[in-house]
């Protein structure tokens, strides 16, 4: 799908590739490791290698079962990525046998528990754009400042949908019985891509509504929306780009609980302070749904999968995130632009790059 960008500048043409010189990722753990326990914690820097290949390599060398090796999240194959891996302490003497130019163990410690999926705060990224003109450098800086102030739509990145971009279609066919895959992990993977597709479609619609609220006056919006004049005025007053609607399912940011938006004015203020955010639905059985005006929009995108929704395990996902911009700099002599930032777990650096470049 063509995701709708919330920034308004024209496309920026630069050279960007996820190579070890231009794309660096560092995982930020959810908690401090205790320093003692039955699990050895490895801080590993890998180059041009998937997390799964790294785990397999460690398993082959140490003799540990892959299921006993823990990691918080799957990192990109491309570029340089640093992440934490846990393995039983009894394999510690085998760690020195790992000889690979693309793997470097930076440090080790211990912890009581195995690292599990989701046990991270997020990731720090360093990226480099090349062949950047002075004019485009200014456009990039303006886009960064807008994102730093307003936040960013938390789309699923292209990686979620496969090389051909059709993983979600396979997931839909599985749900409706038009195709069959015996491998449960593969089946779940394709179905999750379908859920991600529904989420992206919904989020693009909400970005569109927000853009209209920014672009048109109240009178013009009355002829476009079915909302009453009072709600339209409230939407126009909201200071942040992304507009909260009555009945939205909100969430404390970056951690906490989900809750329904009832008192719109109060929640708008908290959203503007980046204390809470809006969530979107990944369709599934027993997943909490939005109500009111927000629920009407959500229902529109769930309609195509209502009859198979019981076959999916759903959840809610941040629809809007607030990247922490750590630094940015234009190097005129080299014609490149460097940017470093932090994103919460589950968010895609490539989505931020797309928002900046509109490409």
Image: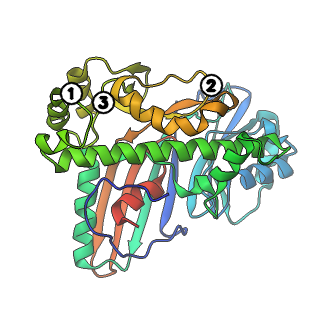
Relative to 110, does residue 336 appear above or below in the rendering? Answer: below
Q: Secondary structure at mark 2?
A: loop
Query: Can you tell which mark lies on residue 245?
Result: 3
Residue 261 appears at what percent x and percent y? 33, 21
Q: CA distance from mark 1 to mark 3?
A: 13 Å
Q: Which residue is mark 2?
A: 285
Q: Secondary structure at mark 3?
A: loop
Mark 2 vs mark 1: give the one in front.
2
Q: Which residue is mark 1?
A: 269
Query: Can you tell which mark lies on residue 223?
Result: none
Residue 261 appears in the figure? yes
Locate residue 112 relative to residue 178 in the image: left or right: left
Q: In terms of depth relative to the viewer, which is nearer, 6 or 103?
A: 6
Q: Secondary structure at mark 1?
A: helix
Q: In terms of depth relative to the viewer, which is nearer, 288 or 54?
A: 288
Where is residue 73, by image quadrant?
top right
Q: In terms of depth relative to the viewer, which is nearer, 305 or 43?
A: 305
Locate residue 137 relative to residue 80 in the image: left or right: left
Residue 79 appears at what percent x and percent y? 56, 64
Residue 144 appears at what percent x and percent y? 28, 57
Q: CA distance from mark 3 to mark 2?
A: 23 Å
* Total count of labels: 3
Where is residue 223, by image quadrant?
top left
Q: Earlier in the sequence, mark 3 or mark 2?
A: 3
Relative to 342, does residue 271 appear above or below in the rendering? Answer: above
Residue 99 appears at what percent x and percent y? 76, 61
Q: CA distance from mark 2 to mark 1?
A: 32 Å
Q: Earlier in the sequence, mark 1 or mark 3?
A: 3
């Amino acid at each position: 799908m063509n995701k709708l960008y919330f920034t308004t500048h024209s496309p920026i043409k630069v050279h960007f590739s996820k190579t070890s010189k231009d794309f660096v990722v560092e995982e930020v753990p959810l908690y401090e490791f205790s320093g003692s326990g039955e699990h050895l914690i490895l801080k590993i820097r890998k180059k041009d290698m998937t997390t799964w290949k790294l785990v397999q390599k460690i398993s082959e060398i140490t003799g540990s079962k892959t299921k006993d090796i823990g990691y918080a999240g799957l990192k990109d194959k491309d570029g340089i990525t640093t992440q934490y891996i846990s393995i039983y302490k009894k394999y510690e003497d085998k760690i020195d046998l790992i000889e690979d130019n693309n793997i470097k163990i930076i440090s080790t410690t211990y912890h009581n528990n195995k690292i599990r999926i989701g046990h991270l705060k997020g990731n720090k990224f360093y990226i480099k754009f090349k062949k950047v003109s002075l004019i485009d450098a200014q456009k990039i800086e303006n886009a960064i400042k807008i994102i730093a102030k307003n936040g960013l739509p938390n789309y699923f990145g292209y990686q979620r949908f496969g090389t051909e971009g059709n993983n979600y279609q396979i997931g839909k066919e599985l749900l409706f019985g038009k195709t069959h895959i015996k491998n449960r992990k593969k089946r779940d993977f394709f179905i999750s891509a379908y859920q991600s597709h529904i989420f992206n479609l919904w989020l693009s619609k909400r970005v569109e509504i927000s853009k209209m609220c920014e672009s048109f006056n109240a009178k013009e919006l009355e002829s476009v929306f079915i909302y009453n004049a009072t709600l339209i005025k409230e939407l126009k007053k909201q200071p942040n780009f992304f507009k909260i609607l009555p009945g939205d399912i909100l969430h404390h940011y970056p951690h906490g609980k989900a809750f329904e938006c009832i008192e719109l004015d109060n929640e708008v203020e908290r959203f503007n302070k980046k204390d809470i955010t809006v969530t979107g639905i990944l369709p599934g059985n027993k997943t909490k749904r939005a109500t009111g005006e927000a629920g009407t929009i959500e229902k529109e995108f769930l309609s195509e999968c209502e009859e198979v929704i019981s076959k999916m395990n759903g959840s809610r996902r941040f629809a809007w995130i607030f990247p922490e911009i750590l630094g940015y700099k234009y190097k005129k002599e080299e014609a490149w632009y460097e940017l470093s930032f932090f994103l919460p777990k589950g968010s895609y650096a490539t989505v931020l790059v797309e928002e900046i470049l509109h490409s």
